[in-house]
Amino acid sequence: MAKNNTNGLKKYAKKRTDIALEKADKAIRNLSMHKEKINFNSVAKESGVSKSFLYNNQQIKERIEDLRQKQVNIKMNQISKKNKTNKSKDTVIQAKDKKIKELKKENNELKRQLKILRGTIYDRN
């Protein structure tokens, strides 16, 4: 008789675990689809499953950790690209400033030469 009770309890526990896994999986897909942060807190909140269940289930735990790390890597890449973009902008600005300085110098030299030529033409007349 005791054996039947434990079999029923095992089946019930397995069923609850399967339902919790399904809820967690659905929550992860939903969070991913909406581009929200994926971590143990967000998955637990979205799925209604306890954090301890998520941590204790190796498959779910590894999946959450992997997705969380991918999101961190994506964020770091975006920050890196932004920094590279800012450095590129700084380089372009420096090049333009240098070119402007050169053009101002050339312009002043041409003005000086024009004055000399005007003076020479004026002296001839």
Image (tube, helix red, strand yellow):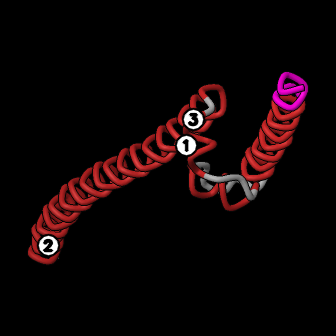
Q: Which residue is mark 2?
A: 115
Query: Which mark, by number, is residue 71?
Result: 1
Q: Which residue is mark 3?
A: 56
Q: Nearer the viewer, residue 94 or 11?
A: 11
Query: Which mark, by number, is residue 106?
Result: none
Mark before the other along the chain sequence, 2 or 3 = 3
The boundaries of the magenta stretch are 1-7
Q: Residue at x 10, y 68 (%)?
A: 116
Q: Nearer the viewer, residue 57 or 13?
A: 13
Q: CA distance from mark 2 to mark 1?
A: 65 Å
Q: Residue at x 64, y 53 (%)?
A: 50
Q: x%, y% of residue 91?
A: 29, 49
Tell me the kind of residue under disc 2.
Lys
Choose mark 1 or mark 3, whichever is in front. Answer: 3
Q: Quadrant of the N terminus?
A: top right
Tell me the kind of residue under disc 1.
Gln
**Label 3: element kind:** helix
Magenta: main secondary structure equals helix
Q: Is residue 52 above or below residue 13?
A: below
